[in-house]
């Protein structure tokens, strides 16, 4: 029997922030790594809210931290007119291919819907560990390629 997946705001699990920060630094070193412009702890703490944007969710699988995703007002500077954005979708390697990304995406979609948004956007790269399958299973549509290796997806709500 598969482990039960629990989805909750990180405010319900503040102990996960430092672990998630390490995951962010490893997953996106150009942004969150040494010398990068991002601050993973700051971004994660800013997402620890129960409403409004930015807002995050964390997934626990069998009691262990399995992943996270956020709903943010902006993401890509060249596409500032779009939003809100599914951002920071990350599932730990040992928990991939268990449906966690799909649960996180569904939770973020619901949060955007509850906030009154008519659509949600995301951008993903072309690497092998992207959440493309989770997006396509939830009926997201690729709308454009940014030219820097990212594809913009949209989901009408």
Image (tube, grey):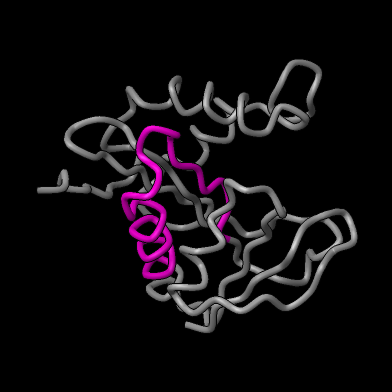
Asked whether 134 or 115 is in front, the reply is 134
63 vs 104, left or right, is left
Q: For the point 63% across and 63% down, which residue is it?
A: 122
Q: Residue 110 falls in which quadrant of the image?
A: bottom left
Would you place residue 36 above or below residue 125 in this image? above
Would you place residue 72 above or below residue 25 in this image? below
Q: Where does the image place residue 90, in percent across and percent down from the top left?
A: 50, 42
Would you place residue 29 above or below residue 108 in this image? above
Q: For the point 58% across and 30% down, which residue is it?
A: 24
Would you place residue 122 above or below residue 95 in this image? below
Q: Where does the image place residue 153, in percent across and percent down from the top left?
A: 65, 71
Q: For the point 33% across and 58% down, which residue is it?
A: 103
Which residue is farthest top?
34
Is-magenta flag for residue 65? Answer: no
Is-magenta flag for residue 88? Answer: yes
Q: Where does the image place residue 1, in percent across and percent down from the top left?
A: 9, 48
Q: For the point 62% across and 25% down, which residue is it?
A: 25
101 vs 11, left or right, is right
Q: Residue 77 falls in which quadrant of the image?
A: bottom right
77 vs 143, left or right, is right
Q: Where does the image place residue 98, in percent across and percent down from the top left?
A: 31, 50
Which residue is farthest left?
1
The magenta segment = 86-111
């Amino acid at each position: 029997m598969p482990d039960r997946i629990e989805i909750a705001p990180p405010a319900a699990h503040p102990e996960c922030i430092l672990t998630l920060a390490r995951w962010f630094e490893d997953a996106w070193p150009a942004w969150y790594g040494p010398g990068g412009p991002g601050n993973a702890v700051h971004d994660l703490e800013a997402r620890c809210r129960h409403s409004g944007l930015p807002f995050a969710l964390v997934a626990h699988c069998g009691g262990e931290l399995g992943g996270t995703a956020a709903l943010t007002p902006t993401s890509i500077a060249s596409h500032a007119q779009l939003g809100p954005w599914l951002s920071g979708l990350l599932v730990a390697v040992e928990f991939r291919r268990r449906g966690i990304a799909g649960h996180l995406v569904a939770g973020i979609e619901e949060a955007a819907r509850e906030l009154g948004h008519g659509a949600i956007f995301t951008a993903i790269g072309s690497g092998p560990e992207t959440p493309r399958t989770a997006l396509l299973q939830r009926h997201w549509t690729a709308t454009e390629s940014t030219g820097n290796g990212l594809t913009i997806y949209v989901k009408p709500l």
